[in-house]
Image: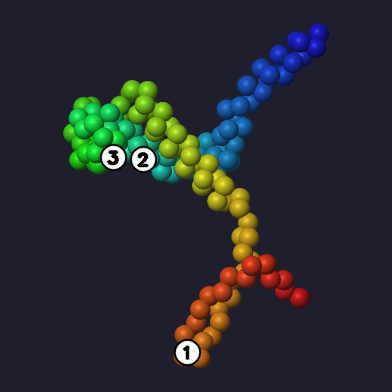
Amino acid sequence: MNGNKIINGILEDLRQLPRNALKPYRKNGKINANKIAMDLIPFLVLFYFTNKYLQAVLASTKEDVLDKCVEAFSLIFQVPPLVAPALGIVPVMGGVIAGASFKLYMGARKKMPNSFGMVRNTAQPNGGQIKILNPTPMTTG
């Protein structure tokens, strides 16, 4: 009996997954396609260029790794398929890893508090100003 409850709970969670994943993109009960597109564009561009670069690295004729990486920049749009991303395991996984890493990095940047505290401008004798980061947050009293 407990097994059925667990399985039913998992299936219910899987049914709710698309609804929960798209929750930030809903507006007035409808999915906002423009917001989805704007959020995905940076990751798709990063995936595409990483994919094409790794495809060019694999197609390079040089033997040394550094030479392969440098030559790949000149081959990036000369290896077939010319415009479409490569479907090989290395280019696809490289593109996915680059896009996911960027997504995680950008998500972490939004959640990180400013650990340096407030920035204050300090006037200098010559009339200029410099910014000083306080190592501890300033409190207003």
Q: Earlier in the sequence, mark 2 or mark 3?
A: 2
Please determine whether, in this image, residue 2 is positioned above or below residue 20. Answer: above
Q: Residue at the spot x=31%, y=33% of the render?
A: 54
Residue 141 lies left or right of residue 85; in this view the side is right
- How crowded is the residue under tag 2: few (<14 C-alpha within 10 Å), some, or many (20+)? few
Distance from label 1 to label 3 (Cα)?
50 Å
The C terminus is located in which quarter?
A: bottom right
Please determine whether, in this image, residue 59 is positioned above or below residue 121. Answer: above
Amino acid type, residue under disc 3 in the picture:
Leu
Amino acid type, residue under disc 1 in the picture:
Gly
**Residue labelled with disc 2:** 45
Amino acid type, residue under disc 2 in the picture:
Val
Distance from label 2 to label 3 (Cα)?
24 Å
Please determine whether, in this image, residue 80 is positioned above or below residue 73. Answer: above
Q: Residue at the spot x=58%, y=70% of the render?
A: 133
Inspect this view and state whether residue 52 appears.
no
Residue 106 appears at what percent x and percent y?
Answer: 51, 47
**Residue labelled with disc 1:** 127
Residue 55 lies left or right of residue 113; in this view the side is left
Using the image, tell me which numbered label, if any, was put on residue 66. 3
Which callout, 1 or 3, points to the residue nearer the camera? 3
Inspect this view and state whether residue 138 appears.
yes
Residue 88 appears at what percent x and percent y?
Answer: 33, 23
Residue 105 appears at what percent x and percent y?
Answer: 51, 45
Residue 23 appears at what percent x and percent y?
Answer: 59, 37
- How crowded is the residue under tag 3: few (<14 C-alpha within 10 Å), some, or many (20+)? few
Farthest residue, direction right: 1
